[in-house]
Amino acid sequence: MDLRDIAMALAIGLGTIGPGIGMGLIASKAVEAIGRNPETEGKVRSLMILGIGLVEALAIFALLIVLIIRFL
Amino acid sequence: MALSIKAEPLFEIGSITVTNSLLSGALVAICLILFFVIYQKNLKLLPTKFQLFIEWVIESIYSLCKDVLGKESAVKLFPIIFTFFTFIIISNWFGLLPFVGSVGTAKHSKGEGGLHIPTIVLGGEQNFFEINSKTEIKPYFRSSSADLNFTIALAIISFLLIQFSALKGAGFHYLGKYFDYRVKIGKGLAMLGVPFMFLINFFWKTLELVLEFSKILSFSFRLFGNIFAGEVLLLVITSLTFGLLTLPFIGFEIFVGFIQAIVFIFLTMVFIKVSVEAH
């Protein structure tokens, strides 16, 4: 096995830990907010998806590093 | 589907190299322009179902715009925001069409050309990465969002939009956010502290400036990474499950394309709002 394969696996594996925790926090807080105040569901949902989109970008950056290791 | 991070050049017009993602981006742009011109010509007072649908889309983006920006700037900025939205979302979805990325020419090591529909080789020595490294596959079309040039261009336009509207809204005070190194001399600050504070201010404002330019990076890599990762995901799933489980993931990619378009315009609007309001 090449050392680059291990580097790729480590990059994506470690890089998704943080965004995973972040996404979980966002979703749990959103569910909590909807539970407390059900009529704001639409607004909270759109904000939640926006936040998840932002956090997802971090995981995507890790993936980008993997692709750079693989192709460049 | 070729798995290369760069767009493949197809032919040249003068000194401009036309890549396959440039081609599909132009195609998407022409289709959108034609669609909206024809749509505008055929507007009816009693709307058809299709017209109602388009109006609903425009209405919901406009209300999002109004929620974030406030009514006055929403009226001014809505056209460009909506253009961003339609262009990005159609570009994202264009990559999911059946012929995109799968029909093209392939150059094997023997040097044969011709119409080629790449299939994923399972088992044996070859996996899908090695198809790419051994044979040169040039699809005629490639999702334009899966090319970094396209997303950087969009990000630069969005960045310029943010800067111009901030300058227009806040005037030259806005530049003070990045170049105002003056030290406020208060009671607690001795004269010796002034150069020190000046240095701190200098570093702080320079960091703010760098941070501002990093918006281009984060905008472009977010869109590119999501769409390119989507293509990789579809390819991997197809090769793992023999194409049986690809359909749900295409649904997921439709969702991701929509979310990324929304995130792009939402962030543009939020940054405009923040930079105007800061002063």
Image (tube, rainbow, N blue to C red):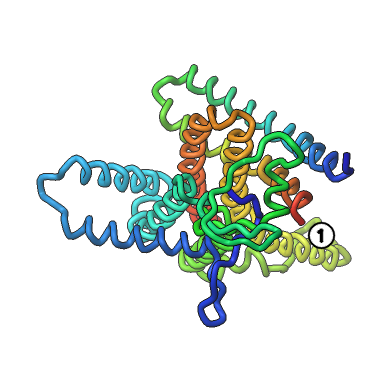
Q: B191 or B51, which lies in front?
A: B51
Percent of width and height locating residue A56? 62, 39
Q: B173 or B235, which lies in front?
A: B235
Q: Residue furthest bottom?
A: B14
Residue at point 25% right, 61% down?
B37
Q: Quadrant of residue A3?
A: top right
Compared with B99, A41 (above or below) is above
Compared with B226, A71 (above or below) is below
Q: Give the side of residue B135 with respect to residue B139, left or right.
A: right
- Residue linked to disc 1: B189
Q: B133 or B278, which lies in front?
A: B133
Q: Give the side of residue A39 with respect to residue B173, left or right.
A: left
Chain identity of mark 1: B
Q: Quadrant of residue B234?
A: top right
Q: Quadrant of residue A59?
A: top right
Res B279 visible: no
- Disc 1 crowd rating (10 Å Cα; few below 14, some 14-19, many 20+) is few
User: Circle 1 — which element?
Assistant: loop
Q: B119 or B33, which lies in front?
A: B119
Quarter the C terminus of chain B occupies = bottom right
The amino acid pointed to by label 1 is Leu
Q: Give the side of residue A65 with respect to residue A4, left or right.
A: left
Percent of width and height locating residue B251? 47, 34
Percent of width and height locating residue B147? 58, 57
Q: Give the side of residue B26 with respect to residue B5, left or right.
A: left
